[in-house]
Amino acid sequence: MPFTERQAQILELAARGHSDKEIARELGLSVHTIRTHLQRLYTTEGFSNRAAAVGAWVALQAGDAPPSKPLSGLHRHVPIWRAGIALGVVAALALSVPLARAVVEMAPSSGHRLAASSSGVASPPPSPSSQVSLQAATPQASPQKTTPTPGATMLPLRTTVPIQVMSANGELSTINQDRAAAGLPPLVWHQCLATVATTQVQRVAAQGFVSSADGSARDAGCHLGSLASPPPAEVLTYWSGVNDAQVNSLIMGDPVQRTAVLGPYHYLGGAWAVAPSGVAYLALELA
């Protein structure tokens, strides 16, 4: 999969965790030029977003070039369990390149539902029923009563790390900067939307993959618009850690997500949830 010299420079800096603004400053270009190069790359190579392009570049540097075009039907829904093997290990651990994916869901309006993809649900890891159970495949020995060896040290029981939830009000500042650049009024933080976002991001972090549910319907329960107002929107995404600038750069680089955050809305609420695995999930609710 050949990359132009400029594309390779941009992807290399992106792989180091730089935002579009930082890459533009490093290369002496405008942010618009950087995003134009990325959009052209998405179009010519069939990448769904910036994370997919960076992952492909990292895999290419490691000598494991992916197919030049994504498989049909997997455009925005590569399962986390598979992407983690192909890209997460190489990118997130070796070069600190995390994976990111987002789903944008519009609330139903007049019987219609707008979503970032045809299904609106990211493919989850294989269900337990599709995996080979080691316990079932291994002959079970008859239970025996054991007695601790004198002098042996008892290991402590493994504890489960709880999901850490925090406000995403940092996204309000970064999104309002982009809205100001587009000549749009700023969004105002709303606690009701933030509460909805907290519920949604806890659900996503607990299940370990991004999927839309009833977030937009719950947003409507905050009663922030009139019948003539556009339906509320929800943005769900994840990253290898809490990073407002990096996630904002990804959102603004995706046409569907960009349309949502630059939409005709007045209020925003959001929350981060860090799963025990260290993956940080983000939910944004707009109305």
Image (cartoon, helix red, strand yellow):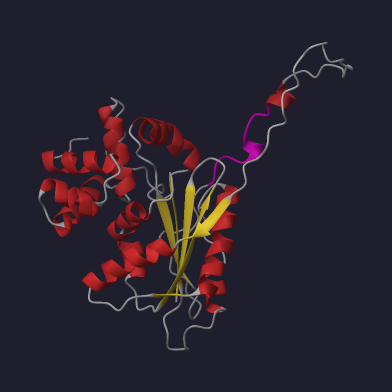
Principal SS element in the magenta part?
loop
Going by the image, does 134 lie left or right of 172? right
Q: Is residue 262 above or below residue 229?
A: above
- Residue 125 on the magenta segment: yes
Q: In this view, does 201 lie above or below 279?
A: below
- Quarter of the figure with the C terminus: bottom left
Residue 138 percent across, percent down from the top left: 73, 19
Q: Is residue 164 magenta?
A: no
**Extreme-bottom residue of the structure:** 227
Q: What stretch is highlighted in magenta?
A: 124-133
**Number of callouts in the render?**
0
Rendering quarter of residue 68: top left
Report the residue at 39% width, 61% height from top: 170
Residue furthest top as drawn: 150
**Among the 4 quarters of the image, the one containing residue 30:** bottom left
- Who is closer to the viewer here, 283 or 255? 283
Q: Is residue 234 above or below residue 60?
A: below
Q: Residue at x 40, y 48 (%)?
A: 100
Position of 158 with respect to 146 (left or right) is left
Q: Which of 124 and 75 is in front in this view?
A: 124
Tell me the residue at 16%/51% (across/down).
24
Up-down relation of residue 211 to residue 227 (above or below): above
- As drawn, the residue found furthest toward the left would be 28
Q: Quadrant of the N terminus?
A: top left
Residue 241: image location, x then y, percent: 43, 46
Q: Position of residue 238 (x, y in %)?
A: 45, 51
**In the rendered image, which quarter is residue 99 located in?**
top left
Q: Furthest residue to the front?
A: 151
Going 56% across and 68% down the picture, which residue do you hit?
Answer: 195
